[in-house]
Image (cartoon, helix red, strand yellow):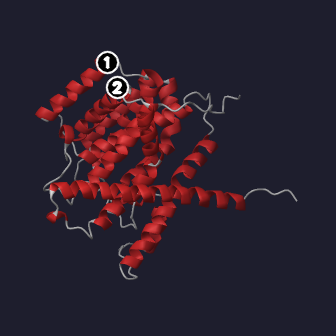
């Protein structure tokens, strides 16, 4: 086997575990906010940070960890193959979900295009950057995918450089990222266009922590797991950490906690359920927000009691599960169909 070939590795339960739980946190976030913000049925600010920030933090850490786990052993990263695989994993499903959602919304709104954006900005949707750039006040046709999709695409662009740094110069890379993080916190005012917590330099510590974890740490000792619990408990009771620093440190501590306790959940029934959540996490991520928004056009959140709110959450989850299952299968079928068009046929 050449140095450019990445050997297929066994799945790590904790990667699926964190990814699956992160997907649930993101769904809970949009179920609560803004519809049930006055009477949420789930904690809205666990450990002193917004629940959505906690979920995204776990997604970022696990994204760094998963990519590093898959590509750490190759002597040299095959860039063409790497970027092609990333594009195939992201864009077909996103395009299909985007088209389906906009067809539905167009019909639901009586043949009216609700988005007030220049026609050329649809190109931002084609490249998956619409949700990310919409947060900077740029008019787009953003429909689904959140800002996180565009952000993770930026991460994919720089991953080869980060991989090199973590593998070959871990200390220097860590120091550079820490300096960029501190400088951004100190120098970037919140009044500027893009929210600071969406900036690459603010989220690099989480992405790279996942890479360092897989490369050098691999397992959470009991003392570290217990320390993470103490930090989370102190933060929950005192709210001593604030802003982006709180999101970063709480996110890392919560990740360590989840990985630590995963050893006690690593049983076949749980593996099957978590494996499904992980497998469909991207599809869930794409469909959940529109599902929740459309359901709340039918159900008045102000009239929901606690029991009915939980029932509505279960109903939303069932709809999301079915649509995610359909989206994955439609995507696989479309990709296979298009691939056949470009197969070389010997005559």
Depth check, front residue: 86 or 300: 300
Residue 270 at what x, y percent from top left? 41, 36
User: Image check: 229 left or right of 203?
Assistant: left
Q: Which residue is mark 2?
A: 260
Residue 334 falls left or right of residue 227: right
| Precedes in sequence: disc 1 or disc 2 | 1
**Marks 1/2: CA distance?**
7 Å
- Does residue 214 appear anywhere in the picture? yes
User: On the picture, is 243 further left or further right than 128?
Assistant: left
Reply above or below: 42 against 323. Answer: above
Which residue shows up at 44% across the image and 23% down it? 218
Residue ID for mark 1:
222
Of all residues, the one furthest to the right in this rendering is: 347
Asked if marks 1 and 2 touch (Cβ < 8 Å), the reply is yes
Image location of residue 7, percent across then percent down: 63, 31
Q: How many marks?
A: 2
Image-quadrant location for residue 57 = top left
Nearer to us in this view, 27 or 306: 306
- Residue that appears at 16% across and 54% down: 306
Query: Which residue is painted at 18% across and 29% down in the image?
Result: 233
- 278 vs 86, nearest the viewer: 278
């Amino acid at each position: 086997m050449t140095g450019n070939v990445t050997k297929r590795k066994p799945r790590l339960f904790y990667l699926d575990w964190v990814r699956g739980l992160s997907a649930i946190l993101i769904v809970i976030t949009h179920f609560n906010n803004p519809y049930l913000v006055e009477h949420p049925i789930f904690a809205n600010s666990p450990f002193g940070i917004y629940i959505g920030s906690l979920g995204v933090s776990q997604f970022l850490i696990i994204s760094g960890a998963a990519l590093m786990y898959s590509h750490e052993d190759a002597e040299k990263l095959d860039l063409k193959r790497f970027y092609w695989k990333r594009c195939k994993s992201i864009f077909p499903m996103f395009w299909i979900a985007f088209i389906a959602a906009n067809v539905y919304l167009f019909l639901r709104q009586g043949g009216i295009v609700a988005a007030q954006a220049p026609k050329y900005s649809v190109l931002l949707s084609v490249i998956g950057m619409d949700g990310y750039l919409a947060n900077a006040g740029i008019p787009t046709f953003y429909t689904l995918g959140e800002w996180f999709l565009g952000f993770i695409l930026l991460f994919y662009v720089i991953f080869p450089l980060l991989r090199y740094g973590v593998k070959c110069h871990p200390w220097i890379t860590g120091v550079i990222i820490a300096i960029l993080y501190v400088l951004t916190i100190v120098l970037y005012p919140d009044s500027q266009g893009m929210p600071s917590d969406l900036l690459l330099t603010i989220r690099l510590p989480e992405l790279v922590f996942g890479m360092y974890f897989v490369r050098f740490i691999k397992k959470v000792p009991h003392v570290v797991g217990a320390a993470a619990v103490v930090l989370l408990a102190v933060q929950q009771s005192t709210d001593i950490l604030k802003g982006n620093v709180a999101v970063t440190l709480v996110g890392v501590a919560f990740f360590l906690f989840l990985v630590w306790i995963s050893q006690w959940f690593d049983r076949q029934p749980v593996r099957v359920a978590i494996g499904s959540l992980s497998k469909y996490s991207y599809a869930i991520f794409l469909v959940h927000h529109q599902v929740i928004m459309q359901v709340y056009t039918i159900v008045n959140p102000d009239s929901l009691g606690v029991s009915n709110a939980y029932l509505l959450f279960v109903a939303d989850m069932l709809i999301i599960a079915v649509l995610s299952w359909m989206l994955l299968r439609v995507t696989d079928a479309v990709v296979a169909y298009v691939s056949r068009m470009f197969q070389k046929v010997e005559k």
